[in-house]
Amino acid sequence: MAGMTANPLDDRLRDLVGDRTAKVLGEHLDLHTTGDLLHHYPRRYAERGELTRLADLPVDEYVTVVAQIAKADKRTYGGGKGVRLEVVVTDGSGSLTLVFFSKAAHAHAHRLIPGRRGMFSGKVSVFNRVRQLAHPDYQLLDVEDGTEAREAVDAFANRLIPLYPACKQITSWRIAQAVDTALNSLAATGWAGVGEPLPDQLRSHRGLAPLPEALEKIHRPRSKQDIAQARHRLKWDEAFVLQVALARRRAADSALPAVPRRPAADGLLTAFDADLPFTLTDGQQAVSAEIFADLAAEHPMHRLLQGEVGSGKTMVALRAMLGVVDAGGQAALLAPTEVLAQQHHRSITEMMGDLAEAGMLGGSDIGTKVVLLTGSMGTAARRAALLDLVTGEAGIVIGTHALIEDKVQFHDLGLVVVDEQHRFGVEQRDALRGKGKQPPHLLVMTATPIPRTVAMTVFGDLDTSVLDQLPAGRSPIASHVVPAAEKPHFLARAWERVREEVGNGHQAYVVCPRIGDAEDAENGGGGRAGGARKGGKTSEQPDDGERRPPLAVTDVADQLASGPLSGLRVHVLHGRMAPDAKDEVMRGFAAGDVDVLVATTVIEVGVNVPNATAMVIMDADRFGVSQLHQLRGRVGRGSAPGLCLLVSEAPEASPARARLDAVAGTLDGFALSEIDLQQRREGDVLGQAQSGARSSLRVLAVMDDRDVIEAAREEATALVAADPELTGHPDLRSALQSLLDADREEFLDKG
């Protein structure tokens, strides 16, 4: 075969299936090699004689169904000038009409006759309240005597028919034909040259099938047991290769040198703790002990600190930073937005008091400087901040991506704290970590609770600490869905509740999905905040142009200020405002000079205004579960109870409404994270947005396959400990390139 490589799974598809099919597979399904094709697994299987339920077909989606022809009629239209063939197929649960026009009607009429069974593929549409496929592709599963060899019928008997994820440009059975070609080609050579990524001893110990057998069984199963065995083996491939990559990262990190950072006795940390007006929770004390043990080691800490909204992660991180300053080093806190960086700087300096005013009149003798560094700072302020960093005058620096610019130099960077890791690219985190004389310790914080199996796959190179205990004084948050389309008076009542909270001396947030300024004006108007547009579609439904655009901050603020919230001090906050303007609004809100803050998700994390007790989230169905939980965490941060109202036009029975009901029904972020994960593709979970590549997980489900992931982690750790460079496992090394593409390896490698 032309273009043969060492491993035939790496051969280009055009050498196997031809340029035309290879082009379609590559452009529309991202399949480029024989290995890509064979790892494009069937999404389900149809048995010969099994009838797929037609009653559940989704409109506007491309589907493949197995059904029997019930009737077929040719009809004329346009005064007899046109011909239409209507074929009704059924499976007992429902029916579907296939429609062919003009020449196609004549061409297919002799084949599509009642009693015959086939696979039919196309986009489901509705015409005169009847679901139909117009000009579908099809393959008949039985034939008339004499038209094809009887062997063709027998080939389908007693066999499961794979149905592949397909698209408009290529049908499931054309993919099946390409897969058959690939399997036949490999079988003809006895699968020569095909690597085996799993070590023989592991396969034997775990009772796993060889790779060729697994690929044969998943594409050409003779029984459901074949499918189960194949999927189990292929899940192991994905879990093991991923865990080997993470184990190698952990091993490499543990081999790096780092400066141990032990807090000085009776130093900055001791003075800070002595001034705390409250007692740390048991969870905060336990996690702090883990962090300080890591900081005292001679290799870099790599720890993930995750916890519920408001669980006190910032306090734990600040104590770690103070400990590093005590030990003669510097600490950097990297925030994803200027608003959050400014908020962190404000809250940390307030918590530290005179300990943050070293060198200033009234500052503590054992204090340090806390410097803010963002991209929008004025030249003089920026120059002063850079000088404080390079001389070591500033023990703590808080900033955005501006911290990683080449001109930013540290005197002795000992600890990097990354807030909301998923918002930073790999190169950004790596650049900041490279600014220390030796690799600095790394603490990653996230307020998005992560199920354990996800933590093992996404953050598998990090040790994990969990804060699941809220500090004393935090108040409960009542959450309710406001069905604006069905019950407009509920929305009117929501604004009354906001007025009541403000009347009681508190403040409120109103969150919108869009800014609505001139830059996105072409998207249309923002709807009405005071009422609701009836008949609005949910985000799960196709966007056919009828659904109004998302509500916008600028529109909603104007409508509220002149309508239901007239007389209150209503201000806006969004990402396109000038930094000074954003800071002025946040300071005003924190000081109580703003009653209602209408904002985008710029306030999602880190914003801490204890007097804010109410939040109204407009078009809440347009946000994800975890994002809604983060937003809700901005209220109830003081002694007064919090209130979160989720406004939506989504119909009561829709998936969007069910998602909102789930958020309203629990404050348990870990429970919500599992719901969130179940509604998203695995590729999203594995940082696909950061690597820009197709997900490497095709059969492994991080929520359902905990046992496989844990066992693979154990096996991978042992193998890497014995053979860090994988010199004795060349096929496994190759699998790191094929199952984990180059971009994702970089993602894992840089942590």
Image (cartoon, rainbow, N blue to C red):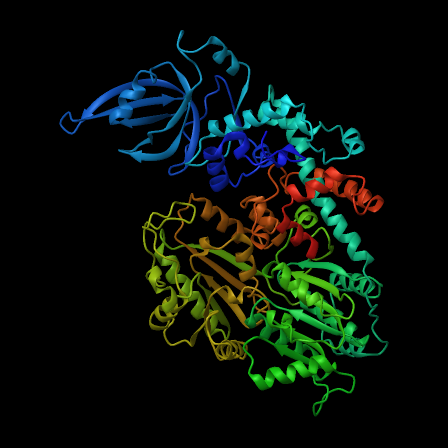
The answer to whether 111 appears left or right of 444 in the picture is left
The quarter holding residue 181 reads top right
Q: Position of residue 380 (x, y in %)?
A: 59, 86
Q: Position of residue 85 (x, y in %)?
A: 27, 23
Q: Position of residue 269 (x, y in %)?
A: 78, 75
Closer-to-camera residue (129/478)? 129
The answer to whether 645 appears left or right of 216 in the picture is left
Image quarter hosting the N terminus:
top right
Closer-to-camera residue (720/674)? 720
Which residue is the extreme one toward the left?
Answer: 79
Q: Is residue 519 above or below residue 744?
A: below
Q: Is residue 91 above or below residue 12?
A: above
Residue depicted at x 79% and y 47%: 725
Looking at the image, how many numbered discs can be counted on the residues? 0
Q: Is residue 266 visible?
A: yes
The answer to whether 29 appears left or right of 710 in the picture is left
Image quarter hosting the C terminus:
bottom right
Q: Is residue 514 above or below residue 21?
A: below
Closer-to-camera residue (322/474)? 322
